[in-house]
Amino acid sequence: MGRTTQTVGRKIDPAISSVFGRKLRSWYRRNARDLPWRRTRNAYEILVSELMLQQTQVSRVVTKYGEFLEQFPTLADVARAKPARVMEAWEGLGYYARARNLHALAREVTDHGRTPNVAIPADPLSLRALPGIGAYTAGAVASFAYERRAALVDTNVARVLKRVFAPHADVKSTKGQKVLWGIAESILPRTGRTTWTHNQALMELGALVCTARIAHCDKCPVRSVCRSAAKQPGGYRA
């Protein structure tokens, strides 16, 4: 394909979006890592993984994730536990505010563990109302647990979207974040099930190929529609 991406406001040319999505998802199906939280649609388990993965390397989370779920199989188990026990199970991951937020969320959703079968909300807006849940985590739980058609933008996704569609966006500014969220929403597939793959693929591309220090353009499945790659034929470097 000879064209580079074009944006109109926060909208992406549908033809470009289609090519980007198709190539991205095809690459993911061939190259995705086998991670335990990708094998479940349990909202609680997805939530635990997303909180653990915030500012923590995947390799450290993989082992801790299984150990934590063995101690606390359900959200109600977290709610009934003393905060100190939850913090102890979180040890080694750092950023303990995440564990405190998970405990507070569990107590709120399950009425301190008295209603164990209550479900974590599926709607991103309802998720945002819970302790410690920001826009990214709400989108991730809605998409990965419930297969909702929900956008998400974390550090990896922001980097991919900036390089491919909006090289001049300042990811650290409020305006830049709005631009990237607008792009993320505009390129969502039509169905929630496909969105699950799409969102996982965006994150995986940022983690494995379009990395912070260097974008491996020669290995990138979407380089034909990437504005940064078009300007850096030998590979884009941050």
Image (cartoon, rainbow, N blue to C red):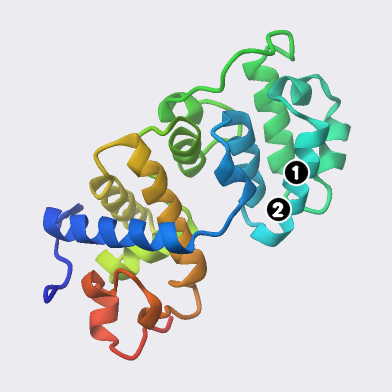
Left or right: where does residue 198 sit relative to residue 136? left
Vertically, is 155 above or below 76?
A: below
Tell me which residue sits at (69%, 13%) in the image.
116
Mark 2 vs mark 1, CA separation in Å: 7 Å
150 and 108: which is toward the camera = 150
Left or right: where does residue 198 sit relative to residue 98? left
The N terminus lies in which quarter of the figure? bottom left
Any mark on residue 62, and which?
A: 2
Q: Is residue 96 visible to us here?
A: no
Amino acid type for the residue under numbered disc 2:
Val
* Residue 13 image offset from top left, x and y in percent: 13, 57
Tell me which residue sits at (56%, 23%) in the image.
120
* Residue 7 image offset from top left, x and y in percent: 16, 60
Vertically, is 185 above or below 219?
A: above
Any mark on residue 66, and which?
A: 1
Look at the numbered disc 2 and give the secondary structure of its residue.
helix
Mark 2 near mark 1, Cβ–Cβ under 8 Å? Answer: yes
Crowd band around label 1 with a 10 angstrom C-alpha radius: few (<14), some (14–19), many (20+): some
Tell me which residue sits at (22%, 70%) in the image.
225
* Residue 144 image offset from top left, x and y in percent: 48, 39
Look at the numbered disc 1 and give the secondary structure of its residue.
helix
- In the displayed image of the protein, which residue is found farthest to the top? 114
The C terminus lies in which quarter of the figure? bottom left
* Residue 94 image offset from top left, x and y in percent: 76, 53
